[in-house]
Image (cartoon, grey):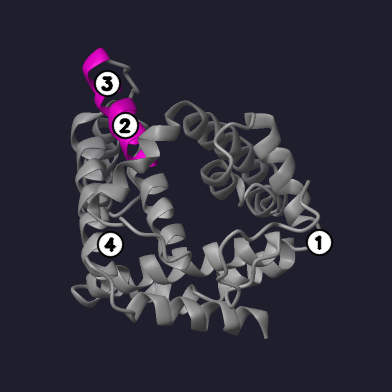
Amino acid sequence: MLRHKLKSHARELVFASHKPHVFSVTFLYILIVMMLAMIIGNLSDFGRVQAEMLDQMWTVMADTVRIGENAAFSLPVFRVTLFGSFFFVASTLLAWMVDLGYLYYARGIVRADSGLGYRSLLEGFNYFAKAVLLRLISGMAISLGMLLFVLPGLIFSAAFSQVNLLLLDYPDKSVRWYFGESVRLMNGHKREYLFLQLSFIGWIFLQALPFLGHAVRVFLTPYMSITFVNYYHHLTGRGPENKEDGWQRPGMF
């Protein structure tokens, strides 16, 4: 079965001998992402509103218990400030670039590229403008689809799932081309892709466990990333077992 084949190959690569090891690079990646999330949560306008909402929720719950009936709850006023907006935008963009850098690293692991390591996490900055546009457009389309109805959001998510790997392979193409080629590659494969995502659901729940969840994340992050790089190779004509140099994607252009 394709799903088992892709995941089995991913596990082999995760535990294979690399310098630095996959887990070390992943740990640094997770640490950076967590630090950026803390900045967004504590210094941005979004983080301020979120903190105010949590404080008000606890107050409402306490008042409800005290008076014996439901207390009033009102949403805090969202005030946009230059200081808060800067930290939100800067931290979000940095997180996006590090995400792309980690995908670059996972792609290199699958292809046995040389020179991979901690610096690979910075590779996303080489594609900054197009990476931001791809993230914004796909994110808005998926969010809109989810708001209208869950199914369109899932369809958009699957249809646009290959844009970042296409960007890494073909940095000179247009943003429109990445979306069009991703949609073409995923034609007839959306259900297959969604079931591949669902096959990790047990691991994802384990991430929520205290203490153990952090260790699970260090394993699950490269496991999933490498699996989806393998899937991209399957779509483009290069299976996990095909490692020869100079390969071509049959019928892609």
Assess disc 2: are there few (<14), some (14-19) or many (≥20) residues with their C-alpha within 10 Å of its C-alpha: some
Relative image position of residue 26 (x, y in whole percent): 28, 62
**For the residues marked 1 and 4, what is the alpha-carbon distance in whole angstroms?**
32 Å
Q: Is residue 34 magenta?
A: no
Q: What residue is rendered at 31% in x and 18% in y?
A: 79
Q: Indicate whether 222 appears above or below 36.
A: below
The relative height of residue 20 versus residue 142 in the rendered view (above or below) is below
- Badge 4 amino acid: Thr
Q: Amino acid at mark 2?
A: Phe
x, y percentage for residue 148?
A: 69, 42
* Amino acid type assigned to the residue bearing label 1 in the image: Gly
Look at mark 1 in the image and give the residue it sits on. 188
- Residue 189 lies in what quarter of the image? bottom right
- Secondary element type, mark 3: helix
Residue drawn at (53%, 32%), measured in percent from left and top?
Answer: 136
Q: Are marks 2 and 4 in contact (CB under 8 Å)?
A: no
- Predominant secondary structure in magenta? helix
Disc 3 from disc 1: Cα separation: 41 Å
Tell which tag, 2 or 1, sits nearer the viewer. 1
Q: Amino acid at mark 3?
A: Phe
